Image (cartoon, rainbow, N blue to C red):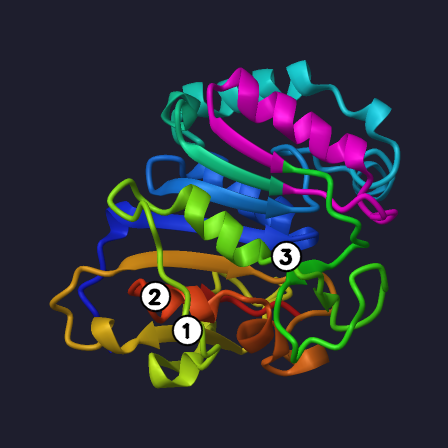
């Protein structure tokens, strides 16, 4: 439905490949996205279009990442109007998370991202002291994976509310104290709606599922509140074709989105 959301209060986040994609979106559309949350991701254009670099330097060999070169590329793209002006990133809030036992996307890759965002003047909070593997950290009892376990659906109970800490950092200024549903009952505050993604696909060869999801809080259904928008991007093997709606419902976003009128989009890749 048409919801009358406030596009100027858009943010994005993601885990792993979704974390990398959140950075891509945040930098390329820094005039639209006003903040980002990155869980185990890396800097903009990290792979420079090279598959081998994507699965080596951008995951486990961060010495192969040249931050200054990536910053120069960013400025070149902006000067040709391919992406938005990176000066938009100055003072924008960025939340970063890297688990101490993440051996999939190494800490050094996230450190490179910290340097990248710092050089463009972003306002960064970087959590890197939680004993966690390559996973989405939550404080939800319904998530049975231990925080140190690398296992599908790559969402764990870490006694740490990753989505909540991220939202508290990147929500627009008027949301100084966002409220979490202490009953953990996101269904009473809104609705998860499946929608057809195909109309948004530029061509037939991108690896997007036909179906995506959006969580619409009850306070956003009548279009009166000019609700915020958040785009949450899952990681590898976390999409609908692998885990159904698990990332949508269990990654910790909805308990905050429902009580803070955040329309949350969950695009689905295959």
Q: Which percent across, then down, holds residue 134?
A: 78, 54
Tag 1 residue: 214
Q: Residue at x 18, y 64 (%)?
A: 4
Q: Secondary structure at mark 1?
A: strand
Q: Secondary structure at mark 3?
A: loop
Tag 3 residue: 160
Instruction: For the N terminus, give its image quadrant.
Output: bottom left
Q: Which percent across, then down, holds residue 59?
A: 82, 41
Asked if the residue at tag 2 contacts the one at tag 1, i.e. Cβ–Cβ closer than 8 Å, the answer is yes
Q: Secondary structure at mark 2?
A: strand
* Residue nearest the observer in this picture, 259 or 195: 259
Asked if the residue at tag 2 contacts the one at tag 3, i.e. Cβ–Cβ closer than 8 Å, the answer is no
Q: Residue at x 71, y 28 (%)?
A: 111
Q: Residue at x 58, y 58 (%)?
A: 161
Look at the image and tell me whether residue 80 can be seen.
Answer: no
Mark 1 or mark 3, which has the lower sequence index? Answer: 3
Give the left or right position of residue 51, taking residue 177 as reference: right
In the image, residue 75 sits, relative to residue 199, either above or below, namely above
Asked if the residue at tag 3 contacts the one at tag 1, i.e. Cβ–Cβ closer than 8 Å, the answer is no
Look at the image and tell me whether residue 258 can be seen.
Answer: yes
Q: Which residues are magenta?
A: 97-126
* Residue nearest the observer in this picture, 149 or 232: 149
In the image, residue 168 sits, relative to residue 245, either above or below, namely above
Instruction: For the C terminus, give its image quadrant.
Output: bottom right
- Dot 1 surroundings within 10 Å: few (below 14), some, or many (20 or more)? some
């Amino acid at each position: 439905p048409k919801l009358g959301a406030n596009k100027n209060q858009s943010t994005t986040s993601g885990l792993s490949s979704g974390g990398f994609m959140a950075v891509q979106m945040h930098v390329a559309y820094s005039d639209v996205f006003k903040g980002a949350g990155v869980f185990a991701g890396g800097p903009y254009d990290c792979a420079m279009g090279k598959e081998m670099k994507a699965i080596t330097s951008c995951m486990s060999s961060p010495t192969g990442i040249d931050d200054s070169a990536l910053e120069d590329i960013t400025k070149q793209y902006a000067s040709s109007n391919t992406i938005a002006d990176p000066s938009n990133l100055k003072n924008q809030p960025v939340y970063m998370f890297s688990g101490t036992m993440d051996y999939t996307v190494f800490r050094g890759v996230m450190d490179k991202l910290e340097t990248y965002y710092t050089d463009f003047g972003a306002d960064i909070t970087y959590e890197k002291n939680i004993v966690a593997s390559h996973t989405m950290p939550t404080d939800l009892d319904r998530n049975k994976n231990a925080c140190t376990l690398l296992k599908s659906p790559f969402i764990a109970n870490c006694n740490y509310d990753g989505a909540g800490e991220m939202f508290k950092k990147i929500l627009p200024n008027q949301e100084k104290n966002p409220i979490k549903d202490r009953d953990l009952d996101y269904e009473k505050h809104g609705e998860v709606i499946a929608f057809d993604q195909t109309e948004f696909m530029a061509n037939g060869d991108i690896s997007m599922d036909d179906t995506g999801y959006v969580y619409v809080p009850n306070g956003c259904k009548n279009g009166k509140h000019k609700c915020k928008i958040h785009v949450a991007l899952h990681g590898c093997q976390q999409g609908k074709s692998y885990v159904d709606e698990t990332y949508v419902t269990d990654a910790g976003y909805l308990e905050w989105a429902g009580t803070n009128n955040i329309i949350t989009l969950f695009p689905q890749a295959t």
